[in-house]
Image: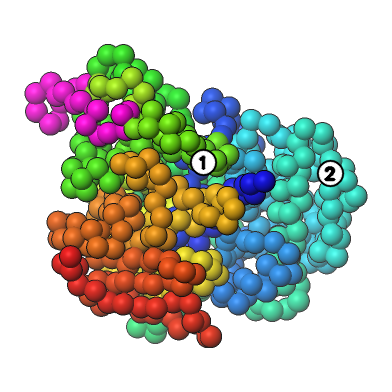
Amino acid sequence: MNKNVFFRFSFYVSLSLLVLFAGKVFSQEREAEPADNFQMEVYLTQEEALKLVFPESDEIVTDEIIMTPEEKQHLEQLLKRRLFEDGFIVYIGKKNDEIQGYAIITEEIGKFHPFTFIVGVKPNGKISEIAVLVYRESRGGEIARKRFLYQFPGKSFKNPIRINKDIINITGATMSVQYMCAGVRKVLGVINEYYLNGKREINVTKEGNDKKMQSSAGVAHRNLNEKQSKKGDEASGKKLVKETRMIMGTFAEISTYSNNVKNAGAAIDAALNEMERMDALLSNYKKDSELSRVNREAAKSPVPCSAEFLEFIEQSLFFSELSGGAFDITVSPLVSLWGFFNEKGHIPSDEEINRLLPSVSYKNIEIKRNGDKKKPGTVFFKHISTQIDPGAIGKGYAVDKALNVFKKYGIDNACINLGGNIYVLGEPDGKDAWRVGIQHPRNKNEILGYLELKDEATATSGDYERFFEIDGDRYSHIIDPRTGKPVKGTIAVTIVAPSGTDVDALSTIVYVLGKEKGLKHLREIPGAEALIACENGGKIVLYTTRGFNEKFTRVENEGKTDVTWHVVSANQQ
Ligand code: AMP
Ligand code: MG
């Protein structure tokens, strides 16, 4: 009997500025749930939630915990679960300078989407308040109601918070209840470890009446606390301004150092809004996006499209030409056939694959312009089953668009991160470069090393992001459009190149083409460098181009023997 296990290793990685792990995560762009099932219920803004939790406080301060890998591991052991975050923002409510309680606004991934909630904890370790800020599932919303949440206040970390034992389940919402229980334990664990056990000295930034606090979907936070930025003494004293939102099914985060917090906040907001606009244009799970409309109608007759949408398609076609079809946004029907859209991975028959192959070709996309490049036009699919999947390029493209918007605010430094597609502008305060950690492809708790980057982008394509296993064989979400089958041999590719679009597309291209051909194609993009990880008989072999090596520092993990390094020349054939 086949053992069929579907994995999604989609751990969102560090929000720390010291090391940003470049795993691409929560790739939820493709989901089992139909687009129109998705609902977003915003119950409370961040400001309202904090007021609810600290009704009496005259001051709310924030403290940002950035965990070391060891601390994270310890917390995971304590909680007996994996954590997707590497840090927490903790709000501390005070009255007359006396601590009244702690609160964390956090997220758990429900069945398909994350939900955001706040848990307030009294100095005696007991839960004082709990509330949901945003719920994004079509079912299970009962967990946001008071008649469910009343069960939590009074409980502390000593209480295991088991479903059906400590917390009464809600029929039909079991998964949501489970995730909520796990999320509450997480908050209690953090507050217990760091504050109630005295591990952390509280020396925090005041943020009580900060009207700029994010008050939209509630998933965002802005950290005005510079204490944790780990800057050297040479830093100029600029503040770290940072905001995170969920966009394109993943975390979008922008950080910048600035003397003008107001302007920096406005720049970050505008850039994140631009990413959201890109999502509304390019999403293949939002029914009303331009892309979804094209997917529905373009096989019947030419579909009128905006100049902006056509530009995106043209960029994609450019990379298809460049890679001889290894990169192809019409791979969609194959991604679906292998079960990556509904997370029911299975091996299709050769017949099924062969039947779909004619629909999969970028040459099936016909663009017509009404004049010059700035004008709208039409898209037509020459094959009845052709469909577009922007998954391999859309996030990088959105990063570039966000960067353009951000630059208009005249700020000279930023780290723009959309699910591991990262562009770094200038230098962080007091440092020469931004550091981006590269995740070990087989051990999510380890990094291979880190890149030091300035005015360039990086992204990683890896088989660990989304895959299923049958009889011990791994089938990854990156498919060779020419064979119709998941790519084998390569397990991860990290690219450094001048733009977000370049790195996103190239990481997929080099992944599909493999080391030899991949390196050859890299030459066509000036400034592109790569790290390619291959697996051979259980051993990981890593190849880096010389230019990559110059920006990269390996981390020697103790006793690590599973990795062999080779430095290769990019024009090696
Ligand atoms: P990335 O993680 O950027 O390499 O993108 C991978 C995603 O792009 C997959 O989850 C698919 O949705 C899609 N995809 C898979 N194979 C290809 C391919 N050969 N060309 C373009 N898109 C692909
Ligand atoms: Mg890509």
Magenta includes 55? no
Three-letter residue code for mark 2: Tyr
Depth check, front residue: 195 or 462: 462
Q: Is residue 98 left or right of residue 462?
A: right
Could you tell me which residue is drawn at 38 percent across and 60 percent down? 490
Depth check, front residue: 334 or 499: 334
The residue furthest right is 165
Depth check, front residue: 13 or 562: 562
Could you tell me which residue is drawn at 45 percent across and 25 percent down? 287
Magenta includes 365? yes
- Image quarter for residue 318? top left
Label 1 neighbourhood size at 10 Å, few (<14), some (14-19), many (20+)? some
Residue to which mark 2 is pinned: 150
Q: Earlier in the sequence, mark 2 or mark 1?
A: 2
- Image quarter for residue 332? top left
Residue to which mark 1 is pinned: 347
Identify the magenta region: 358-378
Q: Secondary structure at mark 2?
A: loop
Which label is found at residue 429? none
Q: Secondary structure at mark 1?
A: loop
The residue furthest top is 301
Q: Look at the numbered discs 2 and 1 and tell me whether their residues touch, using CB distance below 8 Å.
A: no
Alpha carbons under labels 2 and 1: distance apart? 46 Å
x and y, in percent, of residue 42 in the image: 60, 36
Label 2 neighbourhood size at 10 Å, few (<14), some (14-19), many (20+)? few
